[in-house]
Image: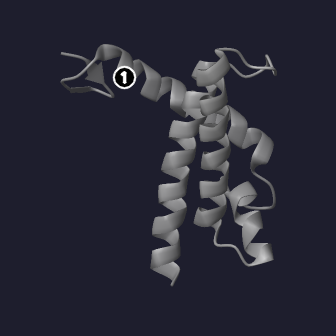
Amino acid sequence: MPKYRGKNYSGHPMFYELLTKMAEIHSVKNKDYATGHHKDPLANFKLSEQMGIPSWKGALVRITDKVSRLWSFAKKEEYAIKSESFEDTLIDLANYSLLCLILYKESKKSG
């Protein structure tokens, strides 16, 4: 039984390893994107609001970009841009999905 954050869970052990990797990637990327006095970790997603697009919908656009990249990879089994691997794209997709959910929930609280 895999142990994650001090608790025992059932499921594939690699799933929990990937959750940790997702958190690490989110943290590292956040240092590049968080701006302003309060260092809002979702500031880059919230920029879409300046154009009248709710931030969670802006995040959906980024999700579709990742899905499009994955579809392209599935057809060719290679990326033209070598700086992001298949694994990187999938982890970004998972992170964007969670961030989209956070933005959606925040919009329902304030709306």
The answer to which image quadrant residue 65 occupies is top right
Q: How many marks?
A: 1
Q: Quick one: 67 or 4, which is closer to the camera?
A: 67
Residue farthest front in this picture:
75
Q: Quick one: 65 or 32, which is closer to the camera?
A: 65
Q: What amino acid type is highlighted by mark number 1?
A: Phe
Q: Quick one: 85 or 41, which is closer to the camera?
A: 85
Residue located 54% across and 63% down the image: 103
Q: Which residue is under mark 1?
A: 15
Q: Quick one: 86 or 99, which is closer to the camera?
A: 86
Would you place residue 105 above or below residue 35 in this image?
below
Count residues near mark 1 (Cα–Cα under 10 Å), then give few for <14, some for 14-19, many for 20+.
few
Q: Is residue 80 left or right of residue 69?
A: right
Position in image of residue 39 (x %, y %): 73, 55
Would you place residue 91 above or below residue 59 in this image?
above
Position in image of residue 78 (x %, y %): 70, 15
Q: Is residue 48 left or right of residue 91?
A: right
Q: Is residue 91 left or right of residue 37?
A: left
Residue located 64% across and 72% down the image: 54
Residue farthest bottom in this picture:
111
Q: Secondary structure at mark 1?
A: helix
Q: Is residue 107 left or right of residue 73?
A: left
Residue located 36% across and 23% down the image: 16
Q: Dividing the image into 4 quarters, which one contains the N terminus?
A: top left
Would you place residue 101 above or below residue 85 in this image?
below
